[in-house]
Image: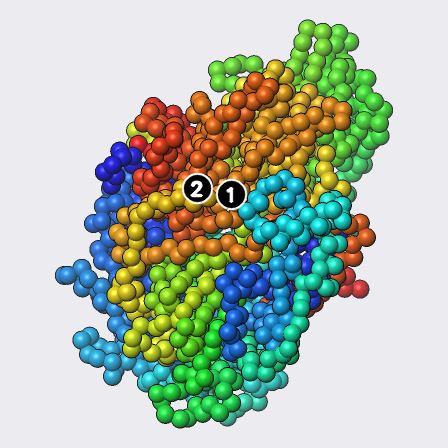
């Protein structure tokens, strides 16, 4: 397998290199934004677990430099052409899009490879730059160092640690004084509009331990979000869809009007990863966030869920030729041990003409594989590998 | 729990899920009990040391939807925890039905005495040593939660959490050091180890009496700490020391001194410490500095010993028994599925430079590798337990492969020797001759080296030396030195015996010596005599024993540089040659390396992988009547007949052939009146090699196949039938002289002799030192399942395919899954396995790997299934890097061939004709979808001798395809109709022919299940054509992706079954026609994580039906 093998197997890995993103996960945020319009009316953002910084890079390019990324950034033109040819899902296109497709089909051969077409768009149509926004404030936090990004404050800290809150508050607001009255120490004077977290642990393979650690990261992010988010603000975080994830959905619903679990096309179907998109922050009356009394431990959240009662309905509706059936599951109600459950609605985002993260792509023969924008982070066992390599070398 | 509207119930009959917790305990009556966490069930086994399998005593469901992560047994009570839940159970009630065959069924809630919920994830828990109503739990945030249990009310009361600081942990261990004090070790996510003391409040009194004292904070590991253990050791000077072991993501194991000494200044606090910013742990101190005592800071904080081990992460570490002076064993348990035993030697170092320090004696140590145990398959040893007794020591391991192993380490305690070398003798000629009173030995001994040897039996070894000496060793208990005597070689033979090149035992009382001068001598043990019995024209390089009957043994003697070999039938006790012959008609390039007899026929294998069948003809010579090239170009190492079928007096028609290419093969000898064939019936590689040196069949009622050979530096004995490693001996590798003697009746009884650096080493074992308490399955995720009614095939991420026989629950007997074949041919994780009838299995994986397997039963007592790869798909793309996501197979219309349709990850569809004669694939039709990865491919009815296809893909659409003529004989797939259904990837699909059309049941990554009806349309060509008619979707069917769906037809209608990553199985009623919507019947929790597939076994109308669910683990549920 040559160097380009991963380029073929993973379209977003290749696109990220072509479009200068630090990691393929940049597309996940772009596709989430396309679906949920995350960045509209947003100037103040906190990005947690940010390294190597691809989400911050998206924030920097969209909010500070004012670039715009449309579908063309990740659209598989070849697939669009084929969808049109096969008439697979005409409803997926607006009349203008269809017109554009027709223009393209007439000018270029339908067998032209997707790779060459995207490199064109990457250079031109994918981005448009408007004016930069001086009011934007973005703070990025990670345990790992993040290479500097234009206009972004980066902090190296542990989001699960209480000391990180004052650190974040003073980064958001230089006039913040940690020694001022206790009431304000853990609430932002100028709250933020959006909190993001793409953090995930190194998975062990022991499913419920991984889910627990991931939920701890999620709760740490939520804790920070509750300290800094303005009412009406948004929270987006990575989530593992496994056993008891419906308990987690129910708990997030306490704080936000809308909770949706979203899967961008750039996230593989074979991965348990998804993103929880929480819109319209509306904490329960009297709730005060504190890292001293963190969420994620204890039964406080479960009690709050039961107080807020998430209603379930049983209906059947029709649309697009499909009958939607709602079912009542008595198991959800009967389990008292693990907490109340609620299944958040699922939305797949990034439209159907987006590159398919599970598909293999053909590359033109002269395709030159690019180096990654940033090398991967050194793993903890790097030294073990080095030592082992040293041992296996001949001693003479 | 039968649903009111539908009389369908689900019962779990069989469970093979990762073993997530283990504990060992001795019952008052002396039983060795093994407690195992299998998902949410606590399972108790009685170990039968020395026998192969443990006995299941009870299975108790403890938690709902929550695996058990820890078990602690003390005071006749079992403390069990998982996530934030704890429960207390009674040992007596869990083992009460001992003596009966019946198993205590777990639903009886009377075994679970009390349950409680802690505020956080629990990593460890322990009852107080002195007070059976008091315990403590350690959480993932470095807290201690006091636990109080009232036996009167059967309630658990948990106290408020106590912590000196709250770092996030990946491991914790606590131990009671006083009636009111626990010592806690926490391993943090960032590679620190925190050791602190927690003094708990007296009963009923409040928190003012709880206090914490942080003793140590060790830095140095460069990754998360996954395991910690603590132990108190008594040193040779009478002092006692407390030590801690930690293991980490960084592949190291470190030992730390945590003895509290007067000079230390611990930080004491009664309240949680003020928050402080800690090092994030990325980039710590240098591993190489660990022993650097010149740095004063590291002196306090450096480990006393460290070692690097395992191929990947280390999940756990445990202290084992101490032996000898200041030495103990340490065990580590890895992601690589191995357990490693380490030898820790401790010593005091006098700290001269730090004379002012009151603790003038510092503990130092050395950690060295002692033995690797690879008893599990796949990845991950998730659980472990150690039981130390006065004269015994046991270690239990539990894996992701659902297997539980119990290793008897008592020999360490009994022999008091340092490590595995206790079982290994290493000798040179000087050592042997020292014990002999022999004149004239001194002047030559220096240059005299051990030359050849063989075991006459388990009790005797015959050794020849370079000086022509013959030595007989009387072998004793495994760790006792043998007694040696020298065999008197007649004077006139002495020079010739110096040329001895082969020593070969032909019976427990006799051996043959072969010389480079072509002479054959007979050695007789009772008389200790050496007799010349025959000569051959050439240098003897090997003597191959063929058979033995009525005191006469048949041997084949190979000569250097000759294709011809010499056959002898020899009287065992006299050495008299009854018959003599020679092989004829072999190719001059044929180099014989192995031979076996099948009835009257002789089968010889060569160095380059050729097999020759020879028949004895009138002239008394063996003439070659058939020569074949095997699939190996490597040396054939052994040929042996398979046991005959039950009741038969004739030998079987089959031979088993082992090879240096890492595979063993079974051939069927097909003797027609005027011709002979050798058909390959079975071919596979065991999980060691590539050098397989030989094999035997056990003398059990149902013979088992045992193979032996080499893996890297180890010699391995492997039970292929049970898929269990019987022995592993570190010998330096395959390129050496070695001999093995084994028992066909006692597993684990063997002696293995090998030459290493001119010395003779003998490793002995008189019984198995480990047992399998529970048998395992694949050690990685199972991706695909297929059932043909009789057998279940599984394809897993570990790149292997296994075939199983499922034995239903029957009168008192547990349901059982018996592995009948295992195939390792794919090099990437399996995508899909599909049966076609009983004889054919198809499999696909990444890299466009696609194999066709011919499956047959053998007419032999050996019950292994014969599986042979008949077809290999070669029509690959240029880079051969696509995944074959799914495929479907059917017989062609005329039944002469098979039709295979594959869906590729690049959106391409291809249909081939597969012909079993020659294993050929012929491309019939091809098509391409939009670019989306095709996840599901199914045949509908045939038209123009090609199937119409139904596909599903990552875009959530279903598509129908028909073919149209293209240039030549090729046809092209044309998309007939595509409809949106799921939001994204359709991960599972099953369909059922309803007579008028199809019902299609799908599960998506979008948490939904859907039913789509396909109806017939009148096609222009007259034959049926299909169109989508109606779609039903349940958007929130599960809380996570649905990777397995199944449709089954029952008398009352069609039932759909779905399994999801949310670890639920759900039953759905599927309406047949145009009316009605899909409805949920019922659901249940499953222990299989990452469920990838479901299959049905048995007869659903007859009521004896079972569904099998596989993913990380496998479960069988009966549906009634």
- Pointer 2: what residue? A322
Q: Are marks 2 and 1 in contact (CB under 8 Å)?
A: yes
Which quarter shows the N terminus of chain B? top left
- Pointer 1: what residue? B980
Same chain for the residues at labels 2 and 1, yes or no? Answer: no
| Chain of residue at mark 2 | A
Residue at 38% of width from left, 25% of height from top? B1099
Q: Is residue B925 left or right of residue B376?
A: right
Which quarter shows the C terminus of chain B? top left
Vertical placement of B896 versus A220: above or below?
above
The image quarter containing residue B600 is: top right
Residue B904 in sight in this render: no
Return the x and y of residue B149 as percentages of the image width and height: 21, 64
Figure label count: 2
Vertical placement of B738 versus B1028: above or below?
below
Who is closer to the viewer here, A249 or B150? A249
Residue at 43% of width from left, 90% of height from top? A178
Q: What element does badge 1 sit on?
A: strand
Who is closer to the viewer here, B76 or B858? B858
| Chain of residue at mark 1 | B
Return the x and y of residue B283 as percentages of the image width and height: 60, 76
Residue at 54% of width from left, 81% of height from top? A137
Residue at 58% of width from left, 74% of height from top? A63
Q: Is residue A167 left or right of residue B547?
A: left
Q: Is residue A16 left or right of residue A321?
A: right
Q: Is residue B228 left or right of residue A303?
A: right
Crowding near the residue tagged with mark 1, few <14, some 14–19, many ≥20 C-alpha atoms within 10 Å: some
The CA span between labels 2 and 1 is: 9 Å
The image quarter containing residue B937 is: top right
């Amino acid at each position: 397998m040559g160097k380009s093998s991963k380029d073929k197997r993973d379209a977003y890995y290749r696109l990220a290199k072509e479009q200068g993103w630090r990691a393929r996960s940049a597309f996940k945020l772009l596709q989430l934004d396309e679906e949920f319009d995350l960045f509209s009316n947003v100037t103040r953002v906190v990005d947690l677990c940010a390294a190597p910084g691809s989400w911050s890079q998206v924030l920097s390019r969209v909010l500070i430099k004012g670039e715009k990324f449309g579908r063309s950034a990740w659209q598989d033109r070849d697939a669009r052409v084929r969808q049109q040819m096969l008439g697979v899902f005409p409803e997926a296109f607006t009349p203008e899009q269809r017109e554009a497709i027709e223009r393209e089909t007439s000018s270029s051969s339908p067998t032209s490879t997707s790779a060459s077409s995207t490199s064109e768009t990457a250079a031109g149509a994918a981005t448009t730059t408007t004016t930069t926004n001086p009011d934007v404030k973005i703070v990025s936090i990670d345990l790992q160092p993040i290479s500097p990004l234009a206009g972004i404050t980066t902090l190296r800290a542990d989001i699960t640690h209480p000391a990180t809150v004052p650190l974040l508050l003073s980064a958001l607001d230089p006039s913040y004084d940690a020694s001022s009255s206790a009431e304000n120490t853990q609430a932002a004077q100028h709250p933020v509009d959006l909190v993001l977290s793409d953090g995930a642990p190194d998975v062990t393979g022991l499913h419920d331990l991984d889910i627990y650690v991931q939920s701890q990261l999620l709760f740490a992010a939520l804790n920070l979000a509750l300290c800094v988010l303005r009412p009406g603000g948004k929270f987006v975080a990575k989530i593992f869809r496994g056993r008891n994830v419906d308990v987690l959905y129910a708990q997030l619903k306490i704080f936000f009007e809308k909770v949706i679990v979203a899967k961008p096309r750039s996230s593989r179907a074979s991965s348990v990863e998804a993103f929880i998109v929480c819109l319209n922050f509306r904490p329960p009356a009297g709730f005060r966030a504190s890292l001293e009394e963190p969420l994620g431990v204890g039964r406080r959240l479960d009690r709050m869920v039961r107080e807020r009662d998430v209603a379930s309905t049983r209906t059947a509706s029709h649309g697009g030729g499909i009958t939607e059936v709602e079912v009542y599951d008595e198991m959800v109600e009967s389990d008292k041990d693990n907490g109340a459950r609620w299944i958040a609605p699922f939305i797949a985002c990034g439209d159907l003409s987006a590159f398919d993260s599970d598909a293999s792509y053909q590359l033109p023969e002269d395709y030159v594989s690019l180096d990654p924008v940033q090398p991967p982070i050194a793993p903890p066992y790097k030294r073990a590998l080095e030592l082992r390599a040293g041992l296996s070398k001949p001693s003479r | 729990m039968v649903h009111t509207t539908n009389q369908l119930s689900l019962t779990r009959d069989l469970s093979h899920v990762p073993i997530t917790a283990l504990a060992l305990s001795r019952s008052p009556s002396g039983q060795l009990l093994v407690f195992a966490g299998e998902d949410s069930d606590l399972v108790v086994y009685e170990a039968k040391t020395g026998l192969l399998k443990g006995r299941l005593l009870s299975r108790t469901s403890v938690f709902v939807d929550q695996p058990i992560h820890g078990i602690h047994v003390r005071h006749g009570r079992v403390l069990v925890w998982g996530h934030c839940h704890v429960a207390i159970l009674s040992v007596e009630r869990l083992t009460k039905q001992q003596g009966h065959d019946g198993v205590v069924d777990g639903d009886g809630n009377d075994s679970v005495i009390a349950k409680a919920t802690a505020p956080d994830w629990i990593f460890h828990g322990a009852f107080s040593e002195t007070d059976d109503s008091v315990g403590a739990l350690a959480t993932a945030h470095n807290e201690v939660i006091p636990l109080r249990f009232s036996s009167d009310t059967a309630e658990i009361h948990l106290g408020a959490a106590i912590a000196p600081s709250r770092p996030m942990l990946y491991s914790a261990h606590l131990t009671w050091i006083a009636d009111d004090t626990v010592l806690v070790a926490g391993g943090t996510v960032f590679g620190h180890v925190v050791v602190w003391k927690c003094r708990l409040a007296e009963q009923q009194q409040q928190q003012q009496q709880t206090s914490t004292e942080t003793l140590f904070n060790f830095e140095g590991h460069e990754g998360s700490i996954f395991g910690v253990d603590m132990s108190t050791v008594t040193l040779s000077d009478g002092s006692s020391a407390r030590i801690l072991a930690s293991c980490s993501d960084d592949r190291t194991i470190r030992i730390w001194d945590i003895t509290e000494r007067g000079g230390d200044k611990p930080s004491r606090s009664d309240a949680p410490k003020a928050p402080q910013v800690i090092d994030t742990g990325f980039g710590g101190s240098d591993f190489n500095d660990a022993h650097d005592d010149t740095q004063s800071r590291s002196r306090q904080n450096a480990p006393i010993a460290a070692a690097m081990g395992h191929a990947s992460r280390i999940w756990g570490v445990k202290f084992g028994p101490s032996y000898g002076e200041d030495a103990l064993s340490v065990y580590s348990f890895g992601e690589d599925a191995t357990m490693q035993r380490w030898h820790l030697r401790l010593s005091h170092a006098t700290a001269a430079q730090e004379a002012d320090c009151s603790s003038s004696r510092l503990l130092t140590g050395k950690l060295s590798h002692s033995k690797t145990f690879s008893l599990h398959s796949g990845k991950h040893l998730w659980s472990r337990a150690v039981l130390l007794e006065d004269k015994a020591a046991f270690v239990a391991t539990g894996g992701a492969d659902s297997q539980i192993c119990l290793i008897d380490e008592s020999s360490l305690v009994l022999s008091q020797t340092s490590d595995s070398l206790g079982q290994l003798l290493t000798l040179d000629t000087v050592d042997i001759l020292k014990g002999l009173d022999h004149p004239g030995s001194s002047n030559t001994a220096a240059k005299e080296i051990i030359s050849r040897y063989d075991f006459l039996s388990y009790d005797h070894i015959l050794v020849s030396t370079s000086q022509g000496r013959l030595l007989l060793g009387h072998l004793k208990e495994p760790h006792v030195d043998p007694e040696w005597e020298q065999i008197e070689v007649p004077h006139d033979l002495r020079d010739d015996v110096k040329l001895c090149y082969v020593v070969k035992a032909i019976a427990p009382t006799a051996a043959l010596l072969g010389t480079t001068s072509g002479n054959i001598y007979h050695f007789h043990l009772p008389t200790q005599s050496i007799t010349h019995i025959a000569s051959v024209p050439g240098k003897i390089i090997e003597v191959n024993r063929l058979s033995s009957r009525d005191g006469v043994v048949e041997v084949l003697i190979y000569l250097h540089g000759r294709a011809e070999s010499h056959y002898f039938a020899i009287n065992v006790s006299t050495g008299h040659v009854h018959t003599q012959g020679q092989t004829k008609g072999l190719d001059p390039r044929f180099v014989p390396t192995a031979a076996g007899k099948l009835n009257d026929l002789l089968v010889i294998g060569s160095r380059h992988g050729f097999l020759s069948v020879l028949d004895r003809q009138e002239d008394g010579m063996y003439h070659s009547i058939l020569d074949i090239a095997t699939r190996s170009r490597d040396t054939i190492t052994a040929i042996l007949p398979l046991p005959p079928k039950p009741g038969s007096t004739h030998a079987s028609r089959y031979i088993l052939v082992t090879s240096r290419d890492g595979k063993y093969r079974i051939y069927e000898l097909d003797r027609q009146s005027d011709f002979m064939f050798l058909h390959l019936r079975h071919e596979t590689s065991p999980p060691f090699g590539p050098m397989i040196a030989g094999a035997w069949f056990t003398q059990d009622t149902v013979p088992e196949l045992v193979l032996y050979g080499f893996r890297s530096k180890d010699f391995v004995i492997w039970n292929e039938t049970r898929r269990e490693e019987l022995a592993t001996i570190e010998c330096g590798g395959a390129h050496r002289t070695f001999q093995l003697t084994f028992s066909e009746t006692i597993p684990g009884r063997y002696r293995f002799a090998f030459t290493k650096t001119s010395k003779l080493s003998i490793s002995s074992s008189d019984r198995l030192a480990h047992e399998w308490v529970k048998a395992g399955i694949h050690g990685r995720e199972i991706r695909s399942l297929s059932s043909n009614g009789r057998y279940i095939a599984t394809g897993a991420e570990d790149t292997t395919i296994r075939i199983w026989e499922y034995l239903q629950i029957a009168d008192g007997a547990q349901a059982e899954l018996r592995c009948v074949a295992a195939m390792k041919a794919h090099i990437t994780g399996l995508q899909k396995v599909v049966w076609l009838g009983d004889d054919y299995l198809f499999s696909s994986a990444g890299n466009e790997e696609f194999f066709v397997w011919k499956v047959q039963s053998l007419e032999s007592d050996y019950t292994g299934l014969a599986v042979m790869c008949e077809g290999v798909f070669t029509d690959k793309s240029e880079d051969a890097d696509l995944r074959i996501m799914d495929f479907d197979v059917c017989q062609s219309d005329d039944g002469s061939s098979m039709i295979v349709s594959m869906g590729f990850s690049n959106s391409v569809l291809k249909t081939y004709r597969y012909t079993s004669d020659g294993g050929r694939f012929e491309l019939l039709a091809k098509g391409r979808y939009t670019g989306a990865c095709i996840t599901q491919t199914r045949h509908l009815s045939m038209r123009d001798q090609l199937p119409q296809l139904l596909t599903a893909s990552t875009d959530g659409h279903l598509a129908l395809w028909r073919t149209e003529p293209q240039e030549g004989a090729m046809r092209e797939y044309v998309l007939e109709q595509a409809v949106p259904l799921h939001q994204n990837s359709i991960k599972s699909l099953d369909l059922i022919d309803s007579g008028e059309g199809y019902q299609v049941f799908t599960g998506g990554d979008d948490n939904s299940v859907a039913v789509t009806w396909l109806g017939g349309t009148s096609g222009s060509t007259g034959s049926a054509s299909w169109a989508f008619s109606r779609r039903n979707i349940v958007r929130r069917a599960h809380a996570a992706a649905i990777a397995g769906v199944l449709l089954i037809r029952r008398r009352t209608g069609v039932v759909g079954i779905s399994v999801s990553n949310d670890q639920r199985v759900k039953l759905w009623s599927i309406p047949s026609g145009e009316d009605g919507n899909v409805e949920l019947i019922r659901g249940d929790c499953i222990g299989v994580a990452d469920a990838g597939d479901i299959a049905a076994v048995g007869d659903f109308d007859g009521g004896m039906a079972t569904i099998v669910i596989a993913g990380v683990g496998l479960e069988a549920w009966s549906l009634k």
